[in-house]
Amino acid sequence: MTLILEARSGGEVDFIREVASREGVDYYLLRRRVAAGRVVIPRNNRKKGARLVGVGEGLTTKVNVNVGTSGVYVDYELEERKVELALRYGADTLMDLSTGGDLDYVRRRLIEKSGGAPFGTVPTYQAWIEGVRRYGSVASIPPDWFLEVVERHLRDGVDFMTIHAAVTRDLASRAVKSRRVMPIVSRGGSMVSAWMLETGRENPYLENWGQVLELFREYDAVISLGDALRPGATADALDELQVGELLLNAKLARESVEKGVQVMIEGPGHVTLDKVVADVKLAKSLSGGVPYYVLGPLVTDTAAGYDHIAAAIGAALAAAAGADLICYLTPAEHLGLPNEEQVKEGLIASKIAAHAGDLVKLGRRAALPDVKMSVARAKLDWEYQLKNAYDPERAAEIRGQFGGAALKSCTMCGQYCVFLLLDKYTRGRREPSVEELLERYGEGLEL
Amino acid sequence: MTLILEARSGGEVDFIREVASREGVDYYLLRRRVAAGRVVIPRNNRKKGARLVGVGEGLTTKVNVNVGTSGVYVDYELEERKVELALRYGADTLMDLSTGGDLDYVRRRLIEKSGGAPFGTVPTYQAWIEGVRRYGSVASIPPDWFLEVVERHLRDGVDFMTIHAAVTRDLASRAVKSRRVMPIVSRGGSMVSAWMLETGRENPYLENWGQVLELFREYDAVISLGDALRPGATADALDELQVGELLLNAKLARESVEKGVQVMIEGPGHVTLDKVVADVKLAKSLSGGVPYYVLGPLVTDTAAGYDHIAAAIGAALAAAAGADLICYLTPAEHLGLPNEEQVKEGLIASKIAAHAGDLVKLGRRAALPDVKMSVARAKLDWEYQLKNAYDPERAAEIRGQFGGAALKSCTMCGQYCVFLLLDKYTRGRREPSVEELLERYGEGLEL
């Protein structure tokens, strides 16, 4: 029985209990949301020692980190170190996007390294890369092969997978002839599209949708419906191709939930700030509220080298509007494979965005870190402030520069620190309690 | 005659013509907005070779960089190098916030270095620091002294100045006894407040408001009305102290415009994402639409070490909602004086935020960089992409890591680059023109 079906049966479901307890939400409410497909808990039933992470309505926004080799650079140890870094700096989920080296081997190594965290893949990559080798050409790859690779990933214990099922042959044909700046920017989506355009056949995942559902049901894994036609430029955002694919993804999502298979929908991409909320609301509304997994979105196309910042802006607003899982972007986006430092920078930017969104979406349920940090700041409690920074070492290093480590205040304000200047006037005032401060954030709302 | 009065007289005003031409807006429209105080062009009439920068309604969002010594670290050369960096990476305006060393000397050196860019100061700092030395104690500083220092800055050619006129004695008394987490976090605001609490007198700028207006009118400089009671924690945002001060600032702003003195209002601070638009709309509505100059806002209190990112999130939304000038924040915010690298990082984050806001506020008038970057990206034109990055050297370095510099695609996707994979299917399609792509961004709107 899958988690959704268990939740529907009305009995006690340990996994849901554990997530409810960790998130501080009501168990029965969470169980109803899992039953309705509005929350997923990605965990392949073959996996031992899974770390349970809830993704969806009413829960904190989660952050995913992509790792993996590329077709031109393969260093398994480097990718393992990225996984370690991601876990150290608070990634909630991980995805292996490897396209170079031994793809089964690297996937298994990274799963091993991931400490039970929800682990995702994009099986289309392997299907394409090994399919071309095995069958001699793209046109010769049989549709069944795509599903065989999916099953191989499921057997390895992969918890969630991007499945590009909604880019139909018709949509792909229209996309490559379209007036978009960039017809298709999803790598897996372009592979499935090229296969359809070469063979003249329909999308292999869509044609075998019943079988896809069976497979994910058997392993109780989460389908993450890919957005092959996500906009790769802000000029292409919310166009008929993107929304055409979303309509079908939403239909497939509703079918999945009905069949007891957990599902998410993936979103963009490049979207100007005025369209971010609309994008999230549309996906949620069409799909019946399944979790929405966004890649940024980037709110400008101009920020290569700093795309983690352009993405954090979009992600914060998306999270505030109801997006549930944010895929990090690194400073190397649009330029190349990220190094370790860039993985860390990208993850922290996404964590900040997710939390900024949660302060809106969850209100006071998310505000304790802000309240405690502000109280520590007002008391010039540097130990607390540094220890609870996103990167304590970096924060301590900055505090220490120009000889600041020993100061009561800091090197910016020195003796003119407001807390020192005003100490004699504020002393004796009745300071607000943590509870009183939390109350100010309200119940939470979605933009 | 001041710029506002000239604009009102209906004649030809060269400065306005120049800004209109640079921004691509109609001259008569811009002149009406200057006349109404909705756009300012900060330029002290004693200054030679001023670079004209328009700030306000219908113009691109500008970014300010703060530099300056601190009470515990004085290195004039370092601050000069920060000015150079700021200009190199596209700062629109500069402010000297020095509180250490010879304050007249450092101000003059930095003005000299600033290449005519609009240059601002916070005279309250010098009034306090030198006032205590000169008169022996805070309580002994006479109110006139605050205005004397303002005039000294005006004589040096300072183009705009933070004037903390709206924190009344009553507001300051209430603030220090309030249930805020942080009663007052503005350094200049806390100095004026401490002076009022020590002397029992009213705010010296407010008491002598007519004289302040006379001075700024004489030099045709811009008053930037400080927000001494801006929230320093998200828990304190949009409370009665902040709004109480804003009400008075708005009144003073309307009076300034009436008298022909250019004026801006300064805004927060720390504000959760759901309140950012409201904060901007409130300031604009109360003040009759004078330019709004925001410090971030930071959308979470937790991001020390990465506050440039928390600020970029708030700033992008604020700009989209109508904020006109964004004060950068660096990764060193809340930790200490920034070093050069941190100045650069903070500036670029703010530039990205300002531009993301402009894509909404100005629509297609701001979208050319995005369109051209996207077209270059789709063509794998790396030369264009790197040259037009916010930091070309950094972008080139990232592209080059793991041996990427010589690739047709990049080290992330290698041979599986979507533009290579789909080339044969997209070839021959009618590509959209730059004009067609710009049309997609619309006329612009304010959130």
Image (cartoon, coloured by chain):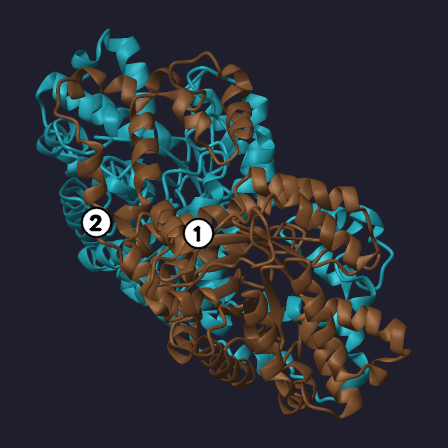
Chain colours: A brown, B cyan
Which is more foreground, mark 1 or mark 2?
1
Query: Is A102 placed left or right of B432 in the picture?
Result: right
Q: Which residue is at the front of the view, A145 or A232?
A: A145
Location of residue B354 in the rendering, given as x and y in whole percent from the top left corner: 47, 55
Report crowding for label 2: few under 14, some 14 to 19, many 20 or more residues within 10 A (C-alpha): many
> Which residue appears at 70% of the width and 76% of the height?
A147
Q: Which residue is at the front of the view, A290 or B350?
A: A290
* Chain letter belonging to callout 1: A
**Total labels drawn:** 2
Q: In which quarter of the image is residue A122?
A: bottom right
Q: Quadrant of the C terminus of chain B?
A: bottom left
Q: Which residue lies furthest to the top in this view?
A: B136
Location of residue A106 in the rendering, given as x and y in whole percent from the top left corner: 76, 52
> Which residue appears at 16% of the width and 17% of the height?
A427
> Which residue appears at 65% of the width and 81% of the height?
A205
Is A332 situated above or below B142? below
The residue that disc 2 covers is B253
Location of residue B261 in the rendering, given as x and y in whole percent from the top left corner: 26, 48
Q: Which residue lies furthest to the right in this view?
A: A136
* Chain letter belonging to callout 2: B
Say the numbered circle drawn on residue B250.
none
Amino acid type of the residue that numbered disc 1 sits on in the rendered structure: Ala
The residue that disc 1 covers is A354
Q: Which residue is at the front of the view, B97 or A228?
A: A228
For label 2, the SS is helix
Is B388 situated above or below B42? below
Q: Are marks 1 and 2 on the same chain?
A: no
Amino acid type of the residue that numbered disc 2 sits on in the rendered structure: Ala
Report crowding for label 1: few under 14, some 14 to 19, many 20 or more residues within 10 A (C-alpha): many
